[in-house]
Image (cartoon, grey):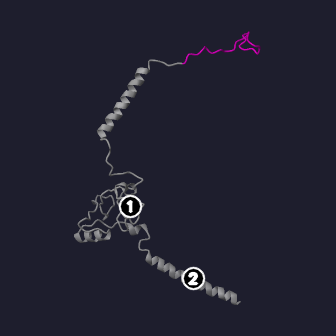
Amino acid sequence: MAYVIGIGVLRKLVLKVNKNALLLGCSRNVAAWNKDWKPGPYPKTPEERAAAAKKYGLIPEDYVPYPDDGDGYGDYPKLPPISGEARDPYYAWDFPVLKKNYGEPLHVISDMLGEDRYNINAKPRFSTATQLMVFLGVMTVLASLFLLAENFSYVHPVMPKQYPGPGVKHYTFEPAE
């Protein structure tokens, strides 16, 4: 009987500790839902702009929100697009895999600006006009060779196919004379 009472007391103690741990855990998590990271409404006054700049860790002079054109960016800052490859690889980043620092606001298209994705800051080796001219030149040469060679057929020389007929022997198992 004492064993059962001891288990009941222990169970109550564990539940009490777990409830406190749960409350502490919930109070420490400031942003636990996606709605907590949702941008606020578009700032219309200088005070709202200053508050939004502080929210995103920017100084008010550097804070420029996206235009209020209905895309839903709200007060999110319009940051310059800088790819992961364009960032300094030797800087002591807080998160070196993504080359990001703690508290740094992400770009709206940050999922496309990683090192394993599109490099928006890359300078092409050749201009677009040069690339187009080379492509059209190669395609023109290949098309002209095809059109010139189309009139000449290339067929392997072969004997006419032998079909079995009545009374004709096409093979024998006797040695040739």
Query: Is the residue 163 above or below the residue 23 in the image?
Result: above
Magenta residues, as a range?
156-177
Q: Residue at x 33, y 61 (%)?
A: 73
Q: Which residue is mark 1?
A: 99
Q: Secondary structure at mark 2?
A: helix
Which residue is depicted at the point 36% across and 28% down?
140
Q: Is residue 147 above or below residue 58?
A: above
Badge 1: residue crowd in 10 Å (few <14, some 14–19, many ≥20): some
**Residue 79 location, quadrant:** bottom left
Question: How far is disc 2 from disc 1 in space, using C-alphas?
Answer: 42 Å
Taking 154 as reference, is 1 left or right?
right
Q: Amino acid at mark 2?
A: Leu
Task: Give x and y (percent) for residue 46.
Answer: 22, 69
User: Residue 77 in the image: x percent, y percent?
Assistant: 30, 63
The secondary element bearing badge 1 is classed as: loop
**Camera-side residue of 53 and 59:** 59
Callouts 2 and 1 close, C-beta under 8 Å: no
Locate residue 164, reporting x and y percent: 69, 14
User: Residue 12 location in percent, x, y?
Assistant: 59, 85
Q: How many marks?
A: 2
Horizontal placement of 64 versus 30: left or right? left
Please tell me which of labels 2 and 1 falls first in the chain.
2
- Chief secondary structure of the magenta portion: loop
Q: Which mark is residue 27?
A: none
Indicate the quadrant containing the C terminus: top left, top right, bottom left or bottom right: top right
- The residue at 34%/55% (across/down) is 86
Residue 93 location, quadrant: bottom left
Is 12 contained in the magenta span?
no
Front residue (pair 25, 83): 83
In the rendered image, which residue does mark 2 sit on? 15
The amino acid sitting under disc 1 is Lys
The residue lying toward the viewer, choosing from 35 and 27, is: 27
